[in-house]
Image (cartoon, coloured by chain):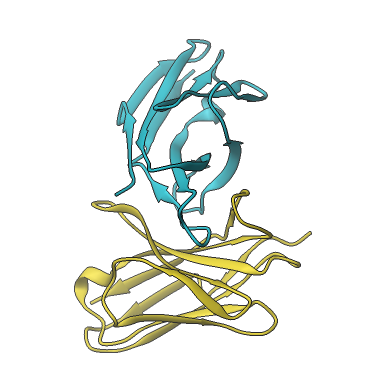
Amino acid sequence: EDQVTQSPEALRLQEGESSSLNCSYTVSGLRGLFWYRQDPGKGPEFLFTLYSAGEEKEKERLKATLTKKESFLHITAPKPEDSATYLCAVQADNNAGNMLTFGGGTRLMVKP
Amino acid sequence: KAGVTQTPRYLIKTRGQQVTLSCSPISGHRSVSWYQQTPGQGLQFLFEYFSETQRNKGNFPGRFSGRQFSNSRSEMNVSTLELGDSALYLCASSWNLGVEQFFGPGTRLTVL
């Protein structure tokens, strides 16, 4: 059974204080790992897709990396508007469709 | 390009009733997935449709069902509602396997 564990559950940062969010996964074969951002009361917003170990993707203050067992979302010099819940999800390659298995999320709060 | 739309946005029902939720995917997307999000269980996969065929089904009772129409619009139905069905129901669309899925704003269902 595919499993995704995110840590920490909650993270409080000062504006400008860089940090990393962790996503550990267990899957028979990885088709893709996805990062999403979710604001309260809204649907998840797509951030990145990673397909193979060693792959990295960047967008503004965010950088996602992937190894064979985990992914990290690095946040550089965060701003209050980066406050949200960050979700990690995996898709197995033995899956006939697009089913995603999600982790519990990391709730990030950035104080000015 | 318009995003994924879901109707209605909010719904209040009583136990034993049934409910139908609607999702219109991004134009050109033929894969539509449904997820249930609750504070205790997080995001859980319900089912996925591609070209009017169900490709995957999550571990939910038969009271949860869905369908997809020839224009890719999808509906999900929950019969004999229970208090535990109160949740945010999210729909996501994608143009292919293994690529990013885009989520709608969700339907907030409250069962009294």
Q: In the depicted view, which residue is nearer to us: B55 or A38?
A: B55
Q: Position of residue A21 (x, y in %)?
A: 42, 24
Identify the residue at image location x=32%, y=27%. Answer: A7
Question: Vertically, is A26 above or below A14?
Answer: below
**What colour is chain A?**
cyan
Q: In the depicted view, which residue is nearer to us: A16 or B70?
A: B70
Q: Quadrant of residue B13?
A: bottom left
Identify the residue at image location x=45%, y=23%. Answer: A110
Left or right: A66 in relation to A11:
right
Question: Vertically, is B79 above or below B61?
Answer: below
Q: Position of residue B50 (x, y in %)?
A: 59, 72
**What colour is chain B?**
yellow
- Pick the quarter of the image with the N terminus of chain B: bottom right
Identify the residue at image location x=38%, y=84%. Answer: B19
Question: Vertically, is B97 above or below B48?
Answer: above
Q: Name, please, the residue furthest toward the right.
A: B1
- Pick the quarter of the image with the C terminus of chain B: bottom left
Q: Position of residue B93 (x, y in %)?
A: 61, 62
Identify the residue at image location x=54%, y=60%. Answer: B105
Left or right: A77 in relation to B11:
right
